[in-house]
Amino acid sequence: MCGIAGEFRFDGAPADPATLQAMVDRLARRGPDGEGLHRDGPVALGHRRLAIIDLTERSRQPMVDAASGLALVFNGTIYNYPQLRAELISRGHAFQSDGDTEVILRAYAEWGEASVARLHGAFAFALWDPRTRRLLLARDRLGIKPLYFSQDGHRLRFASSVQALLAGGGLDTRIDPVALHHHFTLHAVVPAPRTLLQGARKLAPGHTLVVEADGRTTLSRYWQLEARRPATPKSEGEWQEAIHAALREAVKKRLLIADVKVGVLLSGGLDSSLLVALLAEQGVRDLMTFSVGFEDQPEERGHEFEYSDAVAQRYATRHHQFHIPNDQVLRRLPEAVDAMAEPMVGQDAVAFYLLSEQVSRTVKVVQSGQGADEVFGGYYWYPRMSAETEGSAVERFRRHYFDRDQEEFLAMVAPAFHGSDHSADYVAGRLGEPGADEFIDQVLRLDATTLITDDPVKRVDNMTMAWGLEARVPFLDHELVELAASMPPALKLASGGKHILKAISRGLLPDPVIDRKKGYFPMPALKYVRGEFLDFMRGILDSRACRERGLYQRPYVDKLLAAPEKHHTRIQGSKLWHLALLEYWLQRNVDGRV
């Protein structure tokens, strides 16, 4: 896991080394173990390294093949690289290193752009082919690793974060009205290719982008998730056995493909607890687990230690428990916002940031439970959507998911950002795509392929990589996701959600962990806004910068400030925090107010 950046000029000028250096410098925290730069006429590639596989200098990047001139910068991990390496050797390729980076380079030399579909893992990379004068950008199937880019008539730039693109200069920082609608409707999710900034775009998961020397681009989709029942029906027991086997394999791959020790972020929920049990099944000894908690509010506890402690005790893990007081949360909040490649309203962003700081002092790789709820139907709104009998698919979806309906959105933002109901149009189109048997199949496919990418997955990547920590997500192994997508929704929604995972966990985990009500990474102070947190948000929204930006209509802001605890989204997010977070992110990243 690393940070990558680069520039490709179309106007006959050479790539600018100073621009590349500025972009790479902004990615230093993603890769604390080394830096590399490569220039070849119109192309410049930069890399910050987090050494996980083949820790020697032989795997340093950019990696350049002396014979062909092929040059690669890569962020991520290829879990099937040993098998690909063996196949490529059998085809006559010679390797100079023992890591997965060179496998991508040799695979492209053998199969061209089609090689991307052979890669299993989490990845984002850029590969320069001087023979064809083309730059290939690629992103993994589930969007686990980020890849942003900007393009005008003179050049294309790419990077692992929007901040790196901003560091390169010349980025159009005007707000994208469509992206703004998505941001305030879909819990800060802005689906690719958009971002909130008009000049910054991102490559969609499961896609490649080929950039020609004259600036022409070709976007191609190499993977698509289908949610259809298999030709031969399976019994519940057969489904349980198949999912258990696939999950074991996903955990095993993310354990073995590393030359450093691997830990687990143990929240105390079913998903991360099951990862601990599965790692124990693999015979892992001296497993390190990490939990974080915060101060309670009258309405909600700030930790789940009773559950994480029970799992740690059962499997005799070397457990690390961190308790963060509210004054530290507020003091460290600016750092967490600076680590956000895009604004994130999830309350657990700060939690992951502070937890990752502690974990990174002990290990460089952790497994995390993100994706299980989206893939296996764990959220409470899925059964509610399923029970709806009236209206179109998007109407059934929006009643239980959208943060704001169109009328409220129009009352919130300035008239300059008014428009059609962009998010409803987008979701309707995605739900209506072919390849899904039932309504809940459509919903879970949308979640797993899009909504999760720009919410929990991006949050975990940004916050862990801010501390040079790699987070691996076994529940988003694409082969496991494909298998789960073909399973009947009833086996997911039963037992209050994640029925099949609960069945697998029975006997492996304490019953209270399995049977507990679905929890979340608790951060009560950002949900029940009061005291110094309210003062902090008021200061942001009443600031001169906010008023001059003119993004919000003041009556709406004043209404939320007057009674912040009365205004929550359908999934219980603070609407005031949503407004304050976006404005604060813009102040720190776009305005440069640090």
Image (cartoon, grey):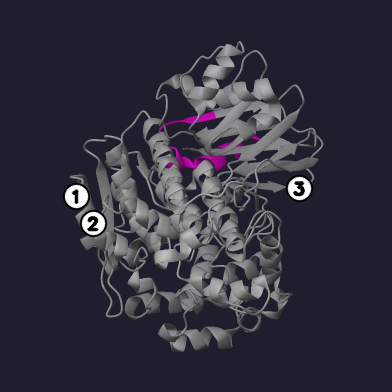
Residue at image position (44%, 54%) is 372
Q: Mark 2 points at which residue?
A: 510
Question: Of marks 3 and 1, which one's residue comes earlier in the chain?
Answer: 3
On the picture, is 47 further left or further right than 15? left
Towards the viewer: 517 or 453: 517
In the picture, residue 174 is in which quadrant?
A: bottom right
- The amino acid type, in three-letter code, at marker 2 is Pro
Residue at image position (32%, 52%) is 505
Q: Answer whether residue 18 is magenta in the image.
A: yes
Towards the viewer: 56 or 124: 124
Q: Distance between the residues labelled 2 and 3?
A: 56 Å
Q: Mark 3 points at which residue?
A: 152
Question: Of marks 2 and 1, which one's residue comes earlier in the chain?
Answer: 1
Q: Name the residue under label 1.
A: 314
Q: Are marks 2 and 1 in contact (CB under 8 Å)?
A: yes
Report the mark closest to the observer, 3 or 1.
Answer: 1
Q: Distance between the residues labelled 2 and 1?
A: 8 Å
In the picture, residue 198 is in which quadrant?
A: bottom right
Question: Of marks 2 and 3, which one's residue comes earlier in the chain?
Answer: 3
Q: Position of residue 438 (x, y in %)?
A: 62, 62
Residue at image position (48%, 51%) is 235
Judge the density around disc 3: few (<14), some (14-19), many (≥20) Cα neighbours within 10 Å: few
